[in-house]
Image: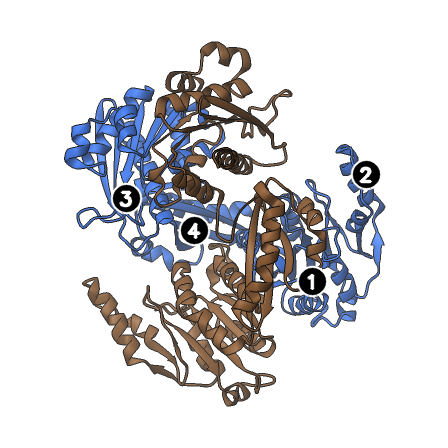
Chain colours: A brown, B blue
Amino acid sequence: MANAEILSIGTELLLGEVLDTNSKFFATELAKLGIDCYYRVTVGDNKDRIKASLKQAFDRSDIVLTSGGLGPTADDLTTECIAEFFSLPMILDEAVLREIEKLFADRNLSMPETNKKQAMRPQGSGVLPNPSGTAPGIMWIVPAEVLAKAGVSDPQRKRAVLTFPGVPSELVNMWNQSGAEFISKNFLTGAIFSIELKHYGIGESALAEKYADLLDGTSPTVAPYAGMGECRLRVAAKANTIEEARALVMPVAELIRKESGKLCYGQDDDTLEAVVGQMLISNNLTLSVAESCTGGLVSKRLTDIGGSSQYIKLNAVTYANEAKMKILGVPQELLEQYGAVSDECARAMAEGIVRLSGADIGLSITGIAGPTGGTPDKPVGTVYLGLCANGQVDTKKLSLGTKLNRQEIRFRTSSAALNMVRLHLLSRNLVTQ
Amino acid sequence: MANAEILSIGTELLLGEVLDTNSKFFATELAKLGIDCYYRVTVGDNKDRIKASLKQAFDRSDIVLTSGGLGPTADDLTTECIAEFFSLPMILDEAVLREIEKLFADRNLSMPETNKKQAMRPQGSGVLPNPSGTAPGIMWIVPAEVLAKAGVSDPQRKRAVLTFPGVPSELVNMWNQSGAEFISKNFLTGAIFSIELKHYGIGESALAEKYADLLDGTSPTVAPYAGMGECRLRVAAKANTIEEARALVMPVAELIRKESGKLCYGQDDDTLEAVVGQMLISNNLTLSVAESCTGGLVSKRLTDIGGSSQYIKLNAVTYANEAKMKILGVPQELLEQYGAVSDECARAMAEGIVRLSGADIGLSITGIAGPTGGTPDKPVGTVYLGLCANGQVDTKKLSLGTKLNRQEIRFRTSSAALNMVRLHLLSRNLVTQ
């Protein structure tokens, strides 16, 4: 089984100026292909350290993926270091140069002389096209004699190097369009198929306990992952073809889906907001949200989804009591008697946003996100949710504890609110089916 | 000058399940202390590879910071690997054990036997307290004879190891309460003082050009960084004492602040939303926002700030034309004649939200975030902002281009909107002073 190493290049990473999302992307994608990754290394824009890291990577790994250092300036050293490491001259690729010139011409700019550098690469290496930027990469099965000359251990073993720019969107495009296929073709004998089943409303240990017998399996493997108040179960198998791998995964995935029922809200890239959006569209329903402590986060998440204007018409952030009264018609007496953070207020807000918007479903959120505002009765993390539909209102109390910070409380509250809408839509479907 | 190496430990990082924000945190903090970081390495939960990485790290670096692998389960290997690498027995720290037991008792739980492991550490090592979790770390100047026995090169040079759990909030607390001071005391001869001056409304290259002469300086150094539509200038100096370093930095920082004027909105951890919030408080003004394409993001950012209920009373997300008419009173004829993405609509929305909320300042955002909805006249990325105050409305058009994705367009729009409020508040102060 081939293994890969991820090498991030850039002093900005070592200064903490930039968060390295590229390495996470590569790691996720390699895992999907079933290629092991044992090391991720970050070095700065320094020739000696880049070359030392290349040596180490080629010695211990089959595939070396680099990000960063492909720009036109003097501190962009990746390509040059690879050429020097393999003692190869840099050549100018005329075809690549013409593409870069064209990119500038399209923007009515003349190409600065420095960008010529981006058309240079080590003699004999292949090009990894960059459809969305000026910096193409290298994509190359390094010949055994080149490896041997550089002193790489076991030079007869197949090695590849792929270089990507540090700009995340360009890197992702290049991987999706060329990189993944190149690696599959050259390094995978079998095929991997995997599904991640996303769960909400159950903790990692409870999920692991529920599926303890499956977690011991090897084909497919089943593993739980937790994060941000959610849990995922990854079901994966390897076989000779993707169809065979799929045939191993699907029955187990279906079993889990059935067992988990409402706890499983989707798979892979699904999000609560996207799933809620799809359900609203397929049921031809609209949703309006009245938020207090989440301050617009639920609205923001719902409208992160392109096309959400189909089911979101109006949301209100009623932070002040006055706004709750004036916009949502929450009675002053109710606020005085129970307070804004109460079951009663959540109920009145949900009713109010339906009245105001005419939406089919009204969702309300009121609580204490902290860091101040907590009381012994209602500590920070106390939240009430309300959902109004068909003239009925359901409410739910969350106690998120005092260990979470403001951002975490707000995020977990927004997920709980979205999930409340999802559960409502599910129960609605069950009734009408 | 001492240098540090960051070692992240955890298979979940190599599978891309988790984004490594800890390494970025360490990198930022080391840069603040003026300690060079040449390498960041990530390995999985594998003894051989962890020990090999420890060997390499101690060989080439003075300070080794690890994150992850301090939990109670079998795949938490960090402490054990350090003990094995240095051929030291693991000892049970009774005082630490009692603290862990107390943590469980406080929650009315009995401590599982496995958690005993978290009170173990290599004989002779020191404790890095963890005030917010069950896993303390090691904080230790490794004696020369221990280094020599492990075969570390140049064992007479001072080396330290500090281990942190992978939970970001615990790691940050432990660094702030103990780690940073330990490193300063043991490795810093001089002191570093730095300020980051945050700019909005000027690009990185324009900023670099404006301050070209300062960028060549060495004491203080001045360097530009770009990201998320903003730019930062970092001014830093090293001297014998923090006061001396400060005295080198401040005149240059003041000069830049004065030169940059309104382009500089704050320093260090300041955000546009926090700065706007402070200005609203000190002017005793309230703000209401009517959002269309940003869908609640501006409201979310404003209310990310604790205490924002002082100046945010009500925001509206009027996604549909109907909501713009009904809630904000945007005339139907206006929408028919100019469309919802227009200067006229932004103006009417800003007036409408002031009318509805009674806020001193009304901010409106309407545009096309994509990926669909663009036209030749109004391509994706076309946004109009409106600001209504004292009966007057200003508008601003943004053309964010078609290269950005939906999230990027929404984020940059939200920053431009917050900056519009900031500039308004600045001009207001100038008038009244």
Q: Could you tell me if the residues under marks 2 and 4 are in contact, i.e. CB atoms within 8 Å?
A: no
Q: Which mark is residue B110?
A: 2
Q: Looking at this view, is B141 or B238 the one in front? A: B141
Residue of label 4: B234
Please name the amino acid that badge 4 sits on: Arg
Give the distance between the C-alpha atoms of the residues marked 3 and 2, in whole angstroms: 56 Å
Q: Could you tell me if the residues under marks 3 and 2 are in contact, i.e. CB atoms within 8 Å?
A: no
Secondary structure under tag 1 reads loop
- The label nearer to you, 2 versus 4, is 2
Q: Could you tell me if the residues under marks 4 and 1 are in contact, i.e. CB atoms within 8 Å?
A: no
Residues flagged by tags 3 and 4 on a common chain: yes
Please name the amino acid that badge 3 sits on: Ile
Residue of label 1: B158
Give the distance between the C-alpha atoms of the residues marked 2 and 4, in whole angstroms: 50 Å
Task: Give x and y (percent) for residue B354.
Answer: 29, 23
- The label nearer to you, 1 versus 3, is 3
Task: Give x and y (percent) for residue A396.
Answer: 56, 27
Please state if B429 lies on the left or on the right of A375 as rendered.
Answer: left
Q: Can residue B253 be seen in this view?
A: yes
Quarter occupied by residue A202? top right
Q: Looking at this view, is A69 or A252 the one in front? A: A252
Task: Give x and y (percent) for residue B119.
Answer: 80, 49
Q: Could you tell me if the residues under marks 1 and 3 are in contact, i.e. CB atoms within 8 Å?
A: no
